[in-house]
Amino acid sequence: MDLAELGAFLKSRRDRIRPGDVGLTAGPRRRVPGLRREEVAHLAGASMDYYTELERGGSARPSEQMLTALARALRLSSDERNHLFHLAGHPSPPLHGPLGHIHPAMLALFDRLADTPARIMTDLHEPLTQNRLAGALLGPLPTVQNRRPGTDSHVYLWFTRPESRDLYPAEDHARHSRDFVADLRAVAARRDDPDIHRMVAELLTRSTEFAALWEERDVALRRHATKRLDHPVIGMIELDCHNLFSEDGRQRLLWLSAPPGSPAADQLALLAVVGTQELPTGERLV
């Protein structure tokens, strides 16, 4: 572990990135060649004081989750990310899963989707990162902390935690369930992975609905769908859901769009303004 070198390395990576590379507006009077400290802290979900302490080589030792967030914020290559973990005294992170490395091409496209909800996930629907509008629409990302692979998957949560369905109208649940199971079977058939087998085995035990759909053996990767969401602030909204897969198929870029001039487009514009502000119970803006 070398915290002083860790701080110097973070600063060197911050200096090389232009705001536009990560979806930020440059603005006037910039006195640094790359990102400001507060911008990196914001992108990584850290406090300004904490990130400043890291760059100064102080006593703070970042967790694997924080290092993963910093690597994504600074657009590190896989070699740079492994080096960052080494400097912080952690083993190299896994290639896939919630701590995995996001494909650079995915991030480059993701950074240009600031005006529409967008999220990068694994092929098992484990969220890796999302933009502000996706957070306002879909809610915050789960905190990854010593969890088994697959348990943060939206598919896993859909069949094991009823509250994960609250955002979607009840009459649409059966269709989403069928789509999720067909998608998971396609992923499981494409790669022989013990994490997938473990996830499927647990779902077969915990959900009779999943078990019945799994026996039907439908197979279909989820590439496009129309979704309705009953949002607590903007009300019912209908959006087109798109999935773009990485070259190796292990990650997917999800974005939700509305036809220009449609009521849903107006609702997304409203959501971009109000964000995640708290409203009195039961109050909506529509």
Image (spheres, rainbow, N blue to C red):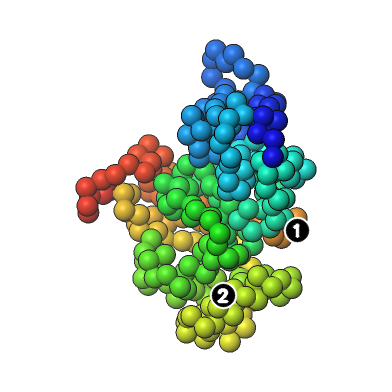
Q: Nearer the viewer, residue 241 or 196?
A: 196
Image quadrant assignment for residue 162 = bottom left
Q: Nearer the viewer, residue 61 or 228?
A: 61
Residue 14 visible (yes or no):
no
Task: Compare residues 32 and 92 and report the one nearer the observer.
Answer: 92
- Residue 102 relative to residue 39: left or right: right
Q: Position of residue 61 (x, y in %)?
A: 58, 40
As measured in the structure, the alpha-carbon distance from the residue carrying label 1 to the one carrying label 2 is 21 Å
Give the quarter of the image for residue 27. Answer: top right
Is residue 230 found left or right of 2 in the rendered image?
Answer: left
Badge 1: residue crowd in 10 Å (few <14, some 14–19, many ≥20): few
The disc at residue 181 is: 2
> 149 above or below 106?
below
At numbered mark 2, what does the secondary structure look like: helix, strand or loop? helix
Picture layout, residue 34 above or below residue 128: above
Q: Earlier in the sequence, mark 1 or mark 2?
A: 2
Q: Position of residue 26 (x, y in %)?
A: 57, 22
Q: Are marks 1 and 2 in contact (CB under 8 Å)?
A: no
Instruction: Decide: is 255 above or below 156.
Output: above
User: What amino acid does circle 1 point to?
Assistant: Asp
Image point 64% across, 62% down: which residue? 123
Q: Nearer the viewer, residue 192 or 186?
A: 192
Image point 35% across, 54% down: which residue?
231
Q: Which mark is residue 248?
A: 1
Label 2 sits on what residue type?
Answer: Val
Quadrant containing the N terminus is: top right
Secondary element at tag 1: loop
In the rendering, at what x and y percent does residue 191 appear? 74, 70
Residue plotted at (31% across, 53% down): 232
User: Is 98 on the left-hand or right-hand side of 159?
Assistant: right
Count every numbered label the image shows and give the total.
2
